[in-house]
Image: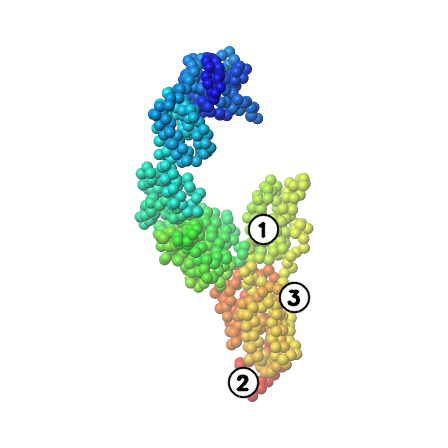
Amino acid sequence: MITNHNSEEINIKPTLPVMPLRDVVVFPHMIFPLLIGREFTINALQEAMNRDKQTLLVAQRKADIDTPEPNDLYDVGVVARILQVMKMPNGTLKVLVEGIVRARIESVSMTDNNHLSANILIVPPDPDEADRETEALSRSVTERFTEYVRLNRRIPDEVLVALASVEEYHQQADTIAAHVLQKIETKQRILETFPIKQQFKLLSRILKEEIEILKIEQRIDGTVRESMSRSQREFYLQQQLKAIKDELGQADEPSAEVDDLYAKLESHDYPEAIRVKAEEEIRKLAKMHPYSAESGVVRSYLDWLLALPWDSTTEDRTNFKEVKSILDGDHYGLEKPKKRILEHLAIIRLAGKVKGPILCLVGPPGVGKTSVGRSVARSLGREFVRMSLGGVHDEAEIRGHRRTYIGAMPGRIIQSIKKAGSNNPVFLLDEVDKTGKDFRGDPASALLEVLDPEQNNTFADNYLEVEFDLSNVLFITTANTVMSIPPALLDRMEIIRLPGYLDFEKASIAQDYLLPKLVKELGLSGIKVAFDDDALFEIIRRYTRESGVRELERQIGAILRRKAVELAEGKRLRTIAISKKKVHSILGAPRFTGTDIKTSPTVGYAVGLAWTEKGGEALPVEVVPMSGKANLTLTGSLGDVMRESATAALSYIRNHAAGFGLKADFFEKLDLHVHIPEGAVPKDGPSAGITMLTAILSALTGIPVRTDIAMTGETTLTGDVLAVGGLNEKLLAAKRLGITRVILPAKNRKDTAELQPDVLEGLQLHFGKRIREVLKLAMTDLPAVNSRPKAGRNSRLSVNR
């Protein structure tokens, strides 16, 4: 069979090798690249190349069939000529083919060379008839195709240039059909349509439908672009989806997200006020564009609102023995906090429900304040959350930001409640004495509502805009000192003081708690580790200076890490025994040698006791008189209050000079230098008043002061001795120095009744109400103190030596 193709006569064989195609239809006059990789298709290609490079290209009815049968192929295909074959790196072949003429399959069979072969009947193109109907159809289809190309950005304009050069009707129809972006079924229908008039009519109908669809897409695209801002361009595809829904009238259909929120609201027993608020916000969200900025704010708010544990409560463990066993197992001593927790449990058992107490644990660093909160939660069976207030300056950290602010969130109170997952956790507010205050607000003032049992059942977070009940929460706060806590906040808390540990208590804690913990952490569980008591006391007294056990833990860890290095280097150790001698060899020279206290009564020298955030310290006071012009020099990094105490002490002595055997004008030609050693350490407070007065009087009279006795107390110009704080720490400092006698203000007598017996053991306490009682105890000798003389303008006080 001979056919004309581009002014060329081509002889078509009646039997041709078949190359089935997937997802593509090739038209006559079309040059198209094919990728083939199936074995039978490659065999058909080889057969065609061996003959005259002619093959039959026919589309499969289903593209997912790898080995098609004759029934899987369409009846009409295209006889094509193979122009070029190229082998690709992955083993497939890239074949460039040119469609020649349509052909109808008469029969298909599998050859011995394992490829399909078909007997075909050529379908020659209709001879071009120059009738008006065909010309009109040609022009109509060409115009519609031109509009189609203009609307469809995926077809290059060069196609129109190529189409304009085509004169034959059948070639025009095939060129247009090849470039219409349609499904395989539609293209195959065009391929099978004869004669040319029917083909033009089919193309006209298809192009008309496509143009209408493209115009709708263009209108949707314009609507989306008008409503988009620069910040929303990334949501372009989602905007298109919305515009399509508008065209279909589906814009008001509830989204799956809204349905999920309603389902979540119904699945929990939320309070009525929360339910009403949530429904209001969900309705608002349903009316918003899903990708607008406001919808993100509402969605975030609903996530917070519905995630809070409004009705989730954990049951308290009410077995007294079990609770006490857990508390004792976690901490050594600390009887007051343990007793208070048991009292709380007793009230819960009797009353059923009780407003959560606000406990404030006050003590020096390292005594276990923070870990007590965790143990309380474990003993009660409650969740535990911790919030550090150190350095917090912004009130919004407590109450949250209003939703009008970008990036607004609830305050850390509500965040922690959500983290806990229950509405009655043990809530530890750490370092409550270290909050700040600036232009952003006062967090301590915001805590007033949180820590007031009468108000916190209606706590209002600025972000939530609804009240949350905090009355079931057991709040525990910690502080190193109450002096920096605002009075209004302090009034809302129950103060429980955690004193510093005695040396033997530290040793017990090290043996029972710290050592097992460190052995486990450092991977030494398979080795027996033992510290001698002498070794522990050496570490406690000469390598640490603290009220707690933090530094003690570090030093023990340093020793065990040294042994871990030896094990890692291959040394075999069955036991690790640490003696006092090994402590020195591992930790080096002792860091602390203790405050040097003179061993015999000394003139112008007295031993005071001071409280610091790290515990108690000895405070030796040295006074030297010298010739001068009535100057008082104070050195040793003394604060304003301590300087005023020294001035008050000197004024008392000058006012009672006669009673102490001094001339009335003794200070006119005299300078006094008061010094407190360790000048790099800042010191302040009034409790060294009686110590400085005693040392100054000793320097002026030459009467020595006993150094086996320490003292603390504030003095007044009239000679009264006022009460001071920090007795527990001060007495512990005295015991560390080996001092057995301590002078305290008489007004502190009541406070000693609350001290542990272990603290008072081995101490002889003396109480002074007036300064003369203190002087009689502290100085080796003192003339009788006369009553204050009446000093006139020209009076002269006699010197009684």
Q: Which mark is residue 519?
A: none
Residue located 54% across and 60% down the image: 613
Q: Amino acid at mark 1?
A: Glu
Lower position in the chain sequence, tag 2 or tag 1: 1
Q: Secondary structure at mark 1?
A: helix
- Other residues around mark 3 within 10 Å, as few (<14) / some (14–19) / many (≥20): few
Residue located 53% across and 81% down the image: 788
Residue 383 in view, yes or no? no
Q: Secondary structure at mark 2?
A: loop
Q: Which residue is mark 3?
A: 599
- Location of the C terminus (image quadrant): bottom right
Q: Which residue is mark 2?
A: 791
Q: Amino acid at mark 2?
A: Ala
Residue 119 in view, yes or no? yes
Q: Position of residue 291 (x, y in %)?
A: 40, 44
Q: Secondary structure at mark 3?
A: loop
Residue located 46% across and 17% down the image: 3
Position above or below: 660 against 461: below
Q: Which residue is mark 1?
A: 553
Position above or below: 481 against 145: below
Lower position in the chain sequence, tag 1 or tag 3: 1
Lower position in the chain sequence, tag 2 or tag 3: 3
Q: Quadrant of residue 741?
A: bottom right
Q: Quadrant of residue 693?
A: bottom right
Q: Residue lying farthest bottom?
A: 794
- Other residues around mark 2 within 10 Å, as few (<14) / some (14–19) / many (≥20): few
Of labels 1 and 3, the one closer to you: 1
Of labels 2 and 3, the one closer to you: 2
The Cα atoms of the two marked residues, 2 and 3, are separated by 40 Å
